[in-house]
Amino acid sequence: MTRRTLTALGLLLSLTAGCNGDSFEARIAGSVDGLNMTITTAYWGGPFIVFTDDSLDCKGLAFISKNTKDGDEPLLEYDARILLLTYNDSDVVEGSYDFGGEAPVTAELIDISGGSMSVYRASEGTMVLDALEDEGLASGEFAISFEENNEDLGALTGDFTLPWCINLKSSY
């Protein structure tokens, strides 16, 4: 499968989601190591906020885990890209967060391509989660930078309003 080419300005998508019938709005701009992000599915739940270019409903996200590492077996059997924001604790919580060092929230871009998986971890950035309804919508914005071995790999910025998904749970 060839890599998708998108404008760095990103796309604004409003789609109907699967779990509770709420729609989502999300916009992501930028790239990491030449990889852009198209958003087809987006949810929050447990300790996760998930954006993916795969057409999954809430039930299809049960594979999401806190233990994903570069070089692991791919999470899926086909090509996909996932932006995963993960809280160290068991739940998504409103507030302002930094992504550097021992941050309470991590950000990873997971690229599954050709039977292998690469995980890019954010080196710095911020996220503001300014609205969170119990089993409802979560909204906020982020600006995330990625670096590896002192080499700038790029950045992603975005804003979102996402529905809750029961299948996103803490898994250690």
Image (cartoon, rainbow, N blue to C red):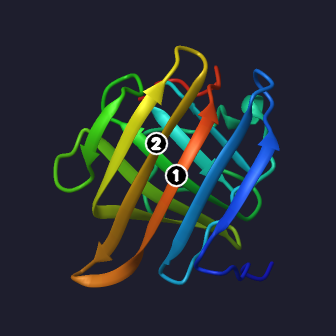
Vertical relation: 63 (above or below) 14 = above
> CB of mark 1 within 8 Å of CB of mark 2?
yes
Looking at the image, which residue is at 78% across and 83% down? Answer: 2
How far apart are the alpha carbons under marks 1 and 2? 6 Å
Looking at the image, which residue is at 46% across and 67% down? Answer: 156
Mark 2 Cα within 10 Å, few/some/many (few <14, many 20+)? Answer: some
Name the amino acid, label 2.
Answer: Gly
The front one of 133 and 123 is 133
Q: Secondary structure at mark 1?
A: strand
Vertical relation: 148 (above or below) 160 = below
Q: Secondary structure at mark 2?
A: strand
Residue 48 rendering spot, x and y as whole percentages: 48, 35
Looking at the image, which residue is at 69% across and 79% down? Answer: 6
The front one of 67 and 12 is 12
**Residue that numbered label 2 is attached to:** 140
**Residue that numbered label 1 is attached to:** 159
Viewport quadrant of the C terminus:
top left
The front one of 62 and 83 is 83
Name the amino acid, label 1.
Answer: Asp
Would you say residue 49 is visible in this rendering? yes
**Number of the label disc, if any, that sits on residue 169:** none
- Going from N to C along the chain, the mark reached first, 1 or 2, is 2
Vertical relation: 123 (above or below) 114 = above
Q: Residue furthest left?
A: 101
Viewport quadrant of the N terminus:
bottom right
Looking at the image, which residue is at 44% across and 49% down? Answer: 141
* Quarter holding residue 18: top right
Would you say residue 74 is visible in this rendering? no
35 with respect to 77 (left or right) = left
